[in-house]
Image (cartoon, helix red, strand yellow):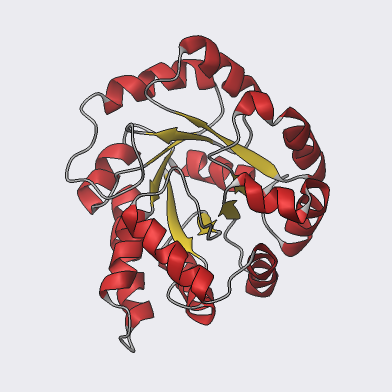
Amino acid sequence: MNRIDKRFRQLRREGKAAFIPFLTVGYPGIRTSERLVLACARAGADIIELGVPFSDPIADGPVIQMSSEVALKNGVTLAGVLRLVRRLKTQVPLAAMMYFNPILAYKPSRFIRDAKASGLDAVIIPDLPAQEERHFLRAAEKAGLHVILFVAPTTSKARLRFIARRAHGFIYFVSLTGVTGARRRLAADLKAQLKRIASVAGRVPVCVGFGISTPGHARTVSSQSDGVIVGSALVKEIAKNRGRRDLVPRVARFVARLARATH
């Protein structure tokens, strides 16, 4: 069984939602990324998203775009990300958040083989629609690598059913229209949207991302869903402390506050 499935089973037994932080691999540096992943695991992360830097993102806001630019300048590649995953050997499930072009350049069959061998549990690809990825999805699932699918506030009920039938690991709910980025307020219709998605998702967990930036947000979202994903706010915290010798423990404390609010 995939480690993500095991984690959600455990969390459901405990009556908790998952806390899922996002880190851009290579920001502010590859070795620091390694330390940050392990610190997030110790601070209470249930699953960790590893952002694979890409030059032409379509879903990322300015904060994550900035971190990707720095990581690319630091020489981070998809092969380098997989080497990092192999070194980590963490008990916390790992999901790579990335665009499809690097996978095409790497060759999809080779990527699936190497990703699974490295220790990755899932891949999240925002620019690959569910109806276009059937071959890749089947091959990945056969290898034991989950492909996490997205739904949005604009997703129709028919498409929700289509995605729910093919979903593994969890469904990633983009809680607002637009790109990633910390927001002051959650979407006004979040509760109604989650109820709509849950009615179709069945037993597949639904996790919420985009715009969640405070412990208060995490507390609210965790009471209405199966998981809370925090990206831009965490990358922003890293940027705020960039250059400090105590960057990792400072970020770990930020992560711990969000994890406690989620759990």
**Residue at screen point 33% across, 31% down:** 177
Regarding residue 16, the answer to whether it shows in the image is no
> For residue 138, what is the image quadrant?
top right
Where residue 119 appears, as percent x and y from the top left, is 71, 61
Q: In x, y percent, where is residue 257?
A: 28, 61
Residue 135 position within the rendered picture, expressed as x and y whole percent measured from the top left: 78, 31
Quadrant occupied by the N terminus: top right
Q: Tell whether 42 sits left or right of 255.
A: right
Q: Residue furthest top?
A: 158
**Residue drawn at (72%, 48%), measured in percent from left and top?**
104
- Marker count (numbered): 0
Q: Is residue 79 rendered to the left or right of residue 234?
A: right
Closer to the camera, 111 or 85? 111
Report whether residue 67 is seen: yes
Give the percent coordinates (x, y) of residue 240: 26, 72
Q: Among all residues in the image, which is located at the extreme bottom?
A: 245
* Residue at x 34%, y 80% (from the top left corner): 247
The residue located at (17%, 45%) in the rendering is 184
Would you place residue 5 above or below residue 31 in this image?
Answer: above
Q: Quadrant of residue 186?
A: top left
Compared across the picture, whether 136 is left or right of 188 comes to right
Q: In this rendering, is residue 57 above or below 189?
A: below
Front-most of residues 153 and 145: 153
Which residue lies most toward the front here? 56
